[in-house]
Amino acid sequence: MIMTPPASPRALTRAQIDQFVTDGVVRIDDAFPTDVAEQARAVLWRDLGLEPDRPDTWTHPVMRLDMYSQPPFIEAANTPVLHAAFDQLVGPGRWRPCRAMGTFPVRFPSPKDPGDAGWHIDVSFGTDDPNFLNWRANIRSKGRALLMLFLFSDVSEADAPTRIRPGSHRRVARLLAPAGEAGLTLGELAARDFGGPGDGSEMSAAGPAGTVYLCHPFLAHSAQPHRGTAPRFMAQPPLLPSDWPDGGVDPHAPVGQAIADALMDG
């Protein structure tokens, strides 16, 4: 008897995929286990050189840690539900498994300005230039399939959740299209008001540890000051296309569909 293989898991409903195309973001609850988040935080606290139960040692509003590839970080980034979501949004075979968690901007309760709370997109090539304002993005999103926000701690509205401007990816697509393969620098996008005034709507990347926000690579987002009581641990790795660094998004997958829809509407 021929056995039928089990169906691939599906992380997202049709409504969620439509939301991603329209808003540029979808939230996945319980994307990775909370005990994995706890193991990862222990590594991060060690590297920060601070004490979790001594707020008097938290003297900076933000501290950055880079490129974690230990088991809990890789396990968090490669759960079946996330892989299924990547297939649904980017396309099967069009992305690379995450082998490092990327940057952790660890934010602490503080009255000080963190100094990095400006709207931006995560540009994806030309990053060898020492001036980050010269880093670039182009209309096919060379070098980046998704922006991802991994919550490794519980994040309330007071705990400096990343601010997101839904629908901003559509304006960015229309700005990038005339620039072709060369694209635009972050500085050029900022000069063109890439986030757009819109209707003023925002959402916050809040939720319990284990939550992941999958964002269109053109989505405008921003940090904000921490007004809560507990440090916020969040990573923001890219999902790389399978033929990185020369590859771009699949025009037939939802991430590419969002770009095509924006250009038709424009």
Image (tube, grey):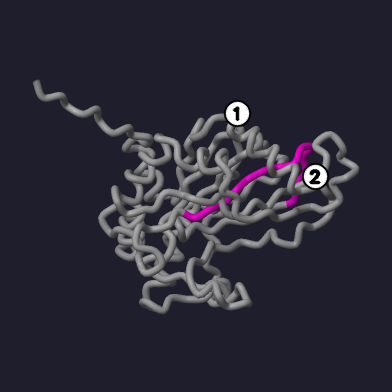
Residue 201 visible in the current orientation: no
Residue 215, image x, y percentages = 47, 50
Question: Considering depth in this image, is 210 or 16 the residue closer to the camera?
Answer: 210
- Rendered residue at 58%/33% (across/down): 36
Residue 108, image x, y percentages = 77, 46
Q: Residues within 10 Å of mark 1 (few under 14, many from 20)?
A: few
Magenta range: 225-238
Task: Please indicate whether residue 10 sits to the left or right of residue 211 in the image.
Answer: left
Question: In the rendered structure, which amino acid carries the disc numbered 2?
Answer: Pro
Question: Considering depth in this image, is 106 or 226 the residue closer to the camera?
Answer: 106
Q: CA distance from mark 2 to mark 1?
A: 24 Å
Residue position marked by numbered label 2 in the rendering: 109
Q: Which SS class for mark 1?
A: helix
Residue 195, image x, y percentages = 54, 63
Q: Which SS class for mark 2?
A: loop
Q: Is residue 186 above or below residue 34?
A: below
Query: Quadrant location of residue 3?
Result: top left
The stretch drawn in magenta includes residue 151: no
Question: Considering depth in this image, is 225 or 23 the residue closer to the camera?
Answer: 225
In the image, which is nearer the foreground, mark 2 or mark 1? 1
Q: First in sequence, mark 2 or 1: give its number.
A: 1
Query: Quadrant location of residue 83?
Result: top left
The C terminus appears in which quarter of the rendering? bottom left
Q: Residues within 10 Å of mark 2 (few under 14, many from 20)?
A: many
Q: Which mark is residue 51?
A: none
- Rendered residue at 37%/36% (across/down): 12
Question: In the rendered structure, which amino acid carries the disc numbered 1?
Answer: Asp
Work out which residue is located at the far right of the displayed protein and give it: 56
Residue position marked by numbered label 1 in the rendering: 35
